[in-house]
Amino acid sequence: MCHRFEALPAITPIAGAAVDVEDLTLTASDGTEFAAFHARAESPSGPGMVILPDVRGLFRFYEELAIRFAEIGIDAVAIDYFGRTAGVSKRDAEFDFWPHVRTTSPEGIAADTAAAVAILRANDADRKVFSVGFCFGGSNSWMQAASGHGLAGAIGFYGHPTRQGLNGGPSPLDRVADVACPILGLMGGADEGIPAEEVDKWDAGLSEQGIAHELITYEGAPHSFFDRTYDEHVDACNDAWQRIQAFIAANS
């Protein structure tokens, strides 16, 4: 499990920021319609961000995160994974997401990401676009760096770098030779599901390919630490948010 349904991103909202938000239904290249949430910055001249959720798919945490990005001048589109099996409607905490997670594929997620990238580049084909994801989405964010989107950078919170994807799909490390942009990883030192040696393998693989990267492990932080209610991890959360902004600035 990743973020609880009632969780909120560990970022303080900016009072008075002008942000325009919209629920979208996007269409992937295979004809699938899927839900997305678009938060537009007051100034449209900055970079764009595609947000890849955890296993629950699109819910409030990721809509709020999109708004936090827009408040600092970054247009953001948060996508849902389950248009092929669950439609485009809003879902509550009782949504049984696991059967839908198991039907996802690397190709489907890449197609959905491409549709979100296209929205962000609709008025500027050369716009710098990044991806960020959490848990399942963290791994998928790194995978998008190897999926031909022309990303400027890919950020992953507590993604598993070496675990094979569902249905035997590749891991991010399996695709490391195809990674075409810088990588940022934000990991929990107390995350029992992602041992430090697996992060080390990701580090070594990226280094061998000459890919610019930074993998940060926060000592004592658990999986899903980037949650506003986790007061004991506020320093890690604040540092992670600052590193994201620095990563975007350095690669824009």
Image (tube, rainbow, N blue to C red):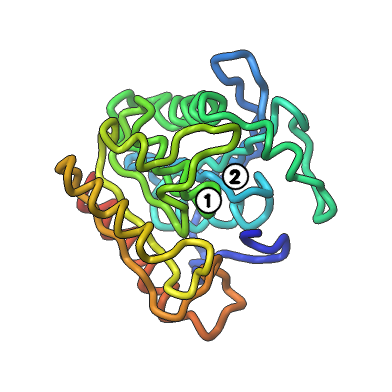
Residue occupied by mark 1: 66
Q: Secondary structure at mark 2?
A: strand
Name the residue nearer the viewer: 242 or 5.
5
The answer to whether any part of residue 177 appears in the image is yes
In the image shown, does 192 or 1 lie closer to the viewer? 192
Residue type, mark 2 in image: Val
Name the mark nearer the viewer: 1 or 2: 1
- 10 Å crowding of disc 2: few (<14), some (14-19), many (20+): some
| Quadrant in which the N terminus is drawn | bottom right
Q: Is residue 168 left or right of residue 80?
A: left
Residue placed furthest toward the right: 94
Vertical order, 110 against 17 (above or below): above
Which residue occupies 18% across, 49% down?
207
Please tell me which residue lies in front, 153 or 214. 214
Q: Give the spatial CA distance, label 1 vs label 2.
A: 9 Å
Where residue 246 appears, as percent x and y from the top left, is 26, 60
Name the outermost residue toward the bottom.
232
The three-letter code of the residue at mark 1 reads: Ala
User: In this rendering, is residue 169 above or below 52?
Assistant: above
User: Can you identify the residue that label 2 sits on?
Assistant: 21
For residue 232, side relative to residue 131 (left or right) = right
